[in-house]
Amino acid sequence: MAIPVIDTRAGERAPSTASASRKRGGFSVHFAHYKWLYLLLLPGVVYFAVFRYAPMYGVSIAFKDYVPFLGINGSPWVGLQHFQDFFSNPDFPRLLGNTLILAFLNLGIAFPLTIVLALLLNEVRLSILKRTVQTLVYIPHFLSWTIVASLSFLLFALDFGPLFLFLNSVMGTNTDFLSDPNWFRTLIVLQEIWKNTGWGTIIFLAALATVDQDQYEAAIIDGAGRFRRVWHITLPGIRSTIIVMLILAIGQMLNTGFEQIYLMTNALNRSVADVFDTYVYFVGITQGAYSYSTAVGLFKAVVGIVLIFGTNALAKRFNQSGLF
Amino acid sequence: MLRRKFSLAAAVVTATALSLTACSGGEAPAADLTTVSIMAPFLEAQPPTADGAVQKKLEELTGKDINISWTPNASYEDKTNITLASSEIPHIMVIQGKTPGFVKNAEAGAFWDLTDKLDDYPNLKTTFPEIQENASINGKVYGVYRGRAPMRAAVMFRQDWLDKLGLEAPKTTEDLYKLAKAFTEQDPDGNGQNDTWGITIPKWGALGTNSPYDFIETWYGAGNRWTEKDGKLIPSFETEEFLEANRFVKKMVDEKLINPDFATFDGTKWNEPFFNGKGGIIVDVDSRVSVLVNLFKQADPNNFENKVGFVGNLKGPDGELHAHPTDGYSGFLAIPKASVRTEAELEKVLEVLNTMNGKDAAILVNNGIEGVNFTVEDGKAATIKPETEEGKAVTTDIKSYAQLGMNVKGNEFYPVKQPTDYEQQVFDKRTEVMAEDLKSAVYNPAAPYVSATYVAKGAQLDNIVADARIKYLAGQIDEQGLKDAIKLWNTSGGDKVKEEINQLWQDNK
């Protein structure tokens, strides 16, 4: 997915450099020359303008006291009131903490695991085995979170869930994993790993297929073992893919997954479970505080943008090609 | 050739643009109002179809095309808020309560103020003005309330277990504790194993939602949401009785007299432990008694009597009966100004509501169609047996249509004749017990009042205390932690809520 993105970019740049050399002719000549390309571009521009940019004017309700009856234009402006309320709210540090902790756990554990799994699959030489395992690990991705949550409830059910009984007998405890706040994040990350790790390997496997086989042969002749080959050939070979995926993952980081968390929350673990996504739903949709929750959502989006640009800049500083 | 292709492309783009603008230009409803659209919740697995017999009869009665959008109850509140923000607003909306979203819209003028209008319509003029007052926003009536039995709290228990252990039905909260203890420790099912518990409580945290916790707190004398202390209104959870009640529940949790997964147990499975002989007691509204009796009847029609016993509200430790009533209404039918624009249209809609609140419509939505699914026997509606396909369809449909029933002049439809004598006895006893308890009802003195701060952040505030209550019961925090949470409620804006509620209360005294 990431690689075609870069390709398109490269393609777009070509006409702009060409236009520089034709500067004398001005835009009209340039336009006449490339009119069919611009026509091709039109549907994309219209799509983004109508479905992505036009709805953004609704974001203005974050700065208003929006009441549906009065409409977006009719509702009074309140400036940064909602942001002030949010930042001074005792919920704020808790939400930010919960969101960031979950985000970093997912990024720090689930993301590398995807690469590890891809490497493992790549080392499997028996084609039939490799394909079977691949298919099996993709399947959980297609189950909805509702099913994943139901399965967890069944497996960890108090007093009779098989995993509840097993884990507690191993640890010699009597923990209710479903309501104990200390276990909430573990459960969430485990579910995420179970559901999405397999699916995430697809791109890495594609990247692994492009690594030059000659290098491996040379390394074998030089006496490199399996781990040395992975470390010195495979990983550098897919480094740019890893970085692009990491930037994308960081951009999505604060989307901690509304459904999953909403389904796993209860009164006993809410203190660690509340994240921006569930809060926006709870306050905005069920309580009708549209403006306030829009402000919260907007804040989340701004943090997401900062993270993307930050990571991109960081990647460039370390002499890697960034995303843009 | 190229030119023709280009003009084709241009035509496509233009057409798309046109259709987009066509979508956004919503048509205003016709002024003569031949069709009345209603948004209502349904609690059954399937909503009724629009061409059912009940729908046709309702259209016949009102003389209008009725267009009901049935919305699943579980997501009704979300859907209400989304509908209000959309351009497709129905003429009549069932609003389930004075939620912040509704209050804000109402105060901005999104709904017709019906305070001075309802009395002009014979079927909308309520005979219970205090319930209408409860359903109002600080005295302003924004809808026709849906009347519900004001007394519903009950304790139900396995009668066969009670008989086997030679115990008596509980009268006080102390009795409830003893009963739960006996059900837990004395092997009431006689299988020689310690595999039963006393009370089953499902995942149900929110404050003031008629949960088992709310009932027990009221029984202890904590009041009902708000209570008067030294000439001021305070939330129930600031009373000493609230703490006592929760100490009592915690003692039962600690002694394993309550199901240990009470914080996560799925409420839709509430009947299962009772029916399967695991947990012998349920504290809930009295209509569950009949549901439980029916469960046993379906399992074994020859031997279902004396499985379910029940009593009403329990006396508290002070020896007094503080019965827990509901607010007497379950939401209301409100009329949005966005769809009903003029006074003339409003009159038309109110006429429809007037008809829907008449005796004929009340019988239709609650009993069904006489001669099709029921007949009248000594003033009661008896189901026609064997059921015809047609009758069955009507019986299924009215379960949903009953959501439109308002009954602001009391129930004008027929009471349902129970299929067996035993069930009739249970039903009559329920009516009797609840009528008796109603005399000792502790009402919520703040029910009609809506404070601005509460609208802005009341639900988050209440969550602080509601979650702390469950955490305290589960042993995650101690009593000091619970008190700290109540303090946090105050400092996060609760003290302002108190101030505003007291102001409104003083002004309306």
Image (spheres, coloured by chain):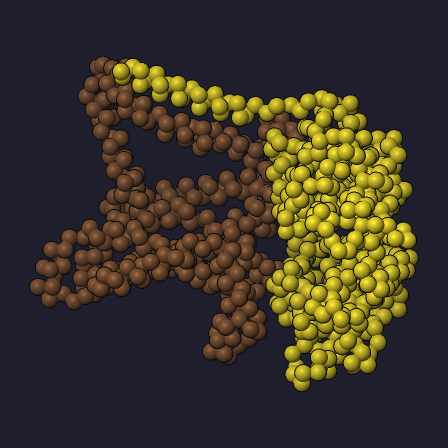
Chain colours: A brown, B yellow
Q: How many marks?
A: 0
* Residue occupying image coordinates x 66% and y 39%: B50
State left or right for residue B398 relative to residue A215.
right
Residue B363 lies in what quarter of the image?
A: top right
For the N terminus of chain B, the image quarter is top left
Residue A208 lies in what quarter of the image?
A: bottom left
Residue nearest the viewer, comparing A275 with A264: A264
Task: Give the image location of residue B191, x and y in percent.
Answer: 67, 83
State left or right for residue B28 relative to residue A233.
right
Residue lying at the far bottom of the rendered structure: B192
- Is residue B242 among the parts visible in the rendering? no
Task: Give the image location of residue A56, x and y in percent.
Answer: 49, 32
Residue nearest the viewer, comparing B322 with B376: B376
For the C terminus of chain B, the image quarter is top right
- Is residue B186 among the parts visible in the rendering? yes
* Residue occupying image coordinates x 60% and y 43%: A285
* Residue occupying image coordinates x 76% and y 72%: B303
Residue B25 lies in what quarter of the image?
A: top right
State left or right for residue A30 relative to residue A305.
left
Task: Give the image location of residue B94, x and y in percent.
Answer: 72, 40
Task: Give the image location of residue B118, x and y in percent.
Answer: 84, 33
Residue nearest the viewer, comparing B197 with A317: B197
- Asked if residue A288 is positioned above or below residue B160 in the image, the reply reads above
Residue nearest the viewer, comparing A175 with B144: B144
- Asked if residue A1 is positioned above or below residue A62 in the image, the reply reads below
- Asked if residue A91 is positioned above or below residue A54 in the image, the reply reads below
